Structure formats: structure tokens, C-alpha cells
């Protein structure tokens, strides 16, 4: 009986030791479980944070993608406008070059016309002197003819001095020369004080006479 009791006590002590060991293992396991739960909570929080960051990043990426597509479309439009503007600028440069060439040609033409006008003006100014002298001579001869006509009517016709006197002939030849230089048509007096266009005087270079 005692032996059985001793065996039972030994078994009980052994069981008690085993139970203590199990209890220690349970406590250790509970501690580890707590730590794992804590780590799991932290991991879950981190994962949720990563998910939120991913959602935010995805939203931003989507927005940036849309902005990029819109910007690419705008860039294509701007590129097309740039190409069109470059073509227009080239056409305008060509037009400016053409207008500059035409302007230079027109300036040279205007300069030539100005020189020609100045030359004609000089010739005109040079011809004014013999023309004025011829007009004065014509007026003087007309006055002299009127005086001679009045004298002829006042006196007898035979007493009228001939118009072919040397002085009158010299003046006539001088007037002829001036008329040839000026190339004008002197007026011819008629009755009543009116004048009518006269015939053109021609000068013979051989005889120095006018007709």
C-alpha cells in the first residue's frame, strides 16, 4: 500500500512538474501571442496606411496622366500653330524681300525720273531767256508796226518808210534767230486790236533769213 502511495505521489509530483512546465509554456505562448497580436496590429495599421498612400498615389497618378494627355494635346495644337506661324513668317519675309526689292527699284526709278526732271527743268530755264527776249522783240515789232500803220494812215502812203530798212531787217533776223531757238509761233496783229496765231518762222542756216 505504501508503495502504491509512493508511486502515486511520484506520479503526482511528476504531473505537477509537467503542469508547471505547461503553465510556463502557456504563459510564454500567451506573451508571444500578445506580442504577435501587437505586431499584427502594427502591421495592419501600416498596411492600411500603405493602402491609403497607394490610393492617394493612384489618384495623383491618374490626375497626372490626364494632365499629361491634355498637355500633349495642347502641345500638338501649339506645334501645329507654330508650324503655321513659321510658314506665315516665311511668306511675310519673302513678301518683305520682294517689297524691299520693288522699293529699291522704285527708288532708282524715281531717282532717274528726278534727274530727268531736273535736266528738263534746266533746259526749260535755259530756254526761258531766249523765249522772253523773243516775246519782247515781238511786242516791240508789233508796237513799231502799229506806229508805222498809224503814221501811214495819217500821212500819204508813199511817205511811209519801207519795212525793209536795214534796221528793221536786222531786228527781224535777230527775232528769227530767237524764234528758232525758242521754237514758238508769234502772234500776228489784225484790225481792231485783236491777235490771231501767226505762222511758224523757219530759219535757213545757209542764208540766215526767215520765211
Image (tube, rainbow, N blue to C red):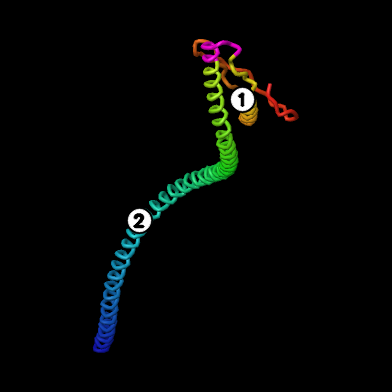
- Relative to 206, is 76 above or below? below
Q: Judge the density around disc 2: few (<14), some (14-19), many (≥20) Cα neighbours within 10 Å.
A: few
Going 34% across and 59% down the picture, which residue do you hit?
Answer: 51
Is residue 37 visible in the rendered image? The answer is: yes
Q: Nearer the viewer, residue 80 or 181?
A: 181
Quarter of image, res 181: top right
How many neighbours does mark 1 have within 10 angstroms: few (below 14), some (14-19), or many (20 or more)?
some
Looking at the image, is 115 positioned above or below residue 199?
below
- Give the CA distance from mark 1 to mark 2: 127 Å
Location of the C terminus (image quadrant): top right
Helix, strand or loop: magenta stretch: helix
Q: Please give the range of residues in magenta.
A: 149-158
- Give left or right: position of 67 versus 111: left
Q: On the image, which quarter does residue 201 sit in?
A: top right
Q: Nearer the N terminus, badge 1 or badge 2?
A: 2
Between tags 1 and 2, which lies in front? 1
Q: Quadrant of the N terminus?
A: bottom left
Assess whether residue 153 is covered by the magenta stretch: yes
Q: Residue 54 location, x and y as percent?
A: 36, 58
Residue extending furthest toward the right:
206
Nearer to the camera, 66 or 98: 98
In the image, taking residue 37 as reference, residue 90 lies left or right, namely right
| Residue 111 position in % (x across, y down) | 57, 42
Name the element at disc 2: helix
- Rendered location of residue 154, percent (x, y): 51, 11
Residue at 47% from the left image edge and 48% from the top image edge: 75
Q: Which mark is residue 55?
A: 2
What residue does disc 1 label?
A: 168
Amino acid at each position: 500500500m505504501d508503495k502504491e502511495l509512493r508511486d502515486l505521489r511520484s506520479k503526482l509530483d511528476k504531473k505537477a512538474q509537467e503542469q508547471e512546465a505547461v503553465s510556463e509554456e502557456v504563459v510564454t505562448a500567451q506573451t508571444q501571442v500578445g506580442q504577435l497580436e501587437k505586431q499584427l496590429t502594427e502591421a495592419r495599421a501600416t498596411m492600411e496606411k500603405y493602402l491609403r498612400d497607394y490610393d492617394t498615389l493612384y489618384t495623383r497618378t491618374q490626375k497626372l496622366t490626364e494632365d499629361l494627355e491634355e498637355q500633349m494635346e495642347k502641345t500638338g495644337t501649339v506645334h501645329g500653330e507654330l508650324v503655321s506661324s513659321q510658314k506665315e513668317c516665311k511668306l511675310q519675309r519673302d513678301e518683305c524681300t520682294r517689297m524691299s526689292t520693288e522699293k529699291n527699284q522704285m527708288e532708282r526709278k524715281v531717282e532717274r525720273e528726278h534727274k530727268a526732271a531736273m535736266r528738263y527743268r534746266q533746259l526749260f530755264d535755259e530756254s526761258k531767256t531766249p523765249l522772253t527776249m523773243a516775246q519782247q522783240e515781238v511786242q516791240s515789232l508789233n508796237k513799231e508796226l502799229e506806229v508805222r500803220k498809224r503814221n501811214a494812215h495819217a500821212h500819204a502812203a508813199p511817205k511811209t518808210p519801207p519795212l525793209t530798212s536795214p534796221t528793221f531787217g536786222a531786228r527781224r533776223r535777230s527775232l528769227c534767230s530767237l524764234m528758232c531757238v525758242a521754237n514758238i509761233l508769234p502772234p500776228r496783229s489784225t484790225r481792231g486790236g485783236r491777235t490771231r496765231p501767226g505762222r511758224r518762222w523757219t530759219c535757213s542756216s545757209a542764208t540766215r533769213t526767215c520765211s
